[in-house]
Amino acid sequence: MTWNWKTGGVALGLAIFLAVLLVKPVGVSTQFVILDAMVADQVNPDLITRTDEGAWTSTNAYLAKSNGKYAKNAANPLNYSFVFVIALMVGAGISAWLRGGNGREDNRIPALWRANFGDAAWKRNLAAFAGGFIVLYGARLAGGCTSGHMMSGLMQTSLSGYIFTLGAFAAAIPVALMMYRKDVQS
Amino acid sequence: MTIFLALLIGGLFGFVLDRIGATNPTVLGRMLALVKLGLMKAILLAIGLGSVLMFAGQMIGLVDVGHMSVKTAYIGVFVGGLLLGTGWAIGGYCPGTGLAGAAGGRRDALYFIAGGLLGAAAYMVTYPSLKAMGLLEKIAGGKVTIGTVPGSGYDGLIGMRGDVLGILLGLAFVAVAFALPENPRKREAAPVAAE
């Protein structure tokens, strides 16, 4: 079963506190870039290179920025941030498995989507794909996502976290109000 | 050791994201459509609690201030936030919950991840032109916090001590978490049992 908001909020609060206590604030969206770079470097080995001084860099300006930080991580997959995201998936998978999963129907099309847009999986998958594209493009433009900007940013009282959160909800709430007019039967 | 911590903290974070329903697009959609705010209350409580623990821990010397990592403020943060919010409502996932949802068996989350990888790649390609447009120019000093956190190296927007302010803001988040109604649009429904 999912937890009520108090239990869940305390557990999530402890998790993001533990992260900043032991290592650094949580963040996810950068790893989409890192995985892209790993794959692209397999196809085109000239993408990520090292200078004579041993510093990592890339022919892609984004990977090369901040002294080749992203290029370096893509060349060394066993870094903290990448393993963190793999572990995130393992943890979520274990949780879902322990509570008996979401059910076959909901795994195919979530209930709220079905209530509003019907039973065609291709429509749902197309929306998820388009949503994913916009989310990650936006997250990279913003320099972080719900984890890095919203949770970690607001926790640290950073200005950028407030700016991001304002933008995210200013768009998400009107879009959701327009899209999800029908509620699920419960 | 670093890898062990990544496994521990990442695993815990993913487990909890699933347990609070964040990996379920129905829960997320109902939150954004202001039907059920339980997830929002959980996130606000988490941010507030995390803030109080972190800043109080810094004040008693338990938490290393150097572990803070404040991101730069620039116009693109707002524009990117608008884009992310739009995709979040359409897709039902954010980057972390998309990955977590896929791990929990959600088929649509795989499409979200595929779209996300393509979106991130599109950003990698278009980064120079966005930079040329001035979207990445920092505002208000860039890496700033609201108050000035002692020893953090980040400037504050206002002169007040950042750790004290951080605890106060954290408590405010907790207060808002409790004050928000769980079912704002169902006032006619039976009252929620006392907790």
Image (spheres, rainbow, N blue to C red):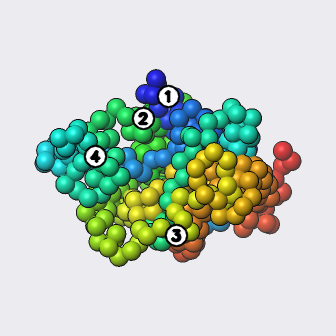
Give the number of the disc on residue A64.
none
Estimate the spatial distance between the alpha carbons at disc 4 and disc 3, rounded to whole Å: 27 Å
Estimate the spatial distance between the alpha carbons at disc 1 and disc 2, rounded to whole Å: 8 Å
Q: Chain of mark 3?
A: B
- In the picture of the structure, the residue carrying the numbered disc 4 is A71
- In the picture of the structure, the residue carrying the numbered disc 2 is A80
Estimate the spatial distance between the alpha carbons at disc 1 and disc 3, rounded to whole Å: 34 Å
| Disc nearer the start of the sequence (2/4) | 4
Placement of B40 over or under A6, stated as above or below: below
- In the picture of the structure, the residue carrying the numbered disc 1 is B5
Q: Chain of mark 2?
A: A
Q: Is residue A83 visible?
A: yes
Mark 1 residue element: helix
Q: Residue at x 57, y 72 (%)?
A: A170
> Of the residues shown, which amino acid type is indicated by label 1?
Leu
Question: Is there CB contact under 8 Å for labels 1 and 2?
Answer: yes
Q: Chain of mark 1?
A: B
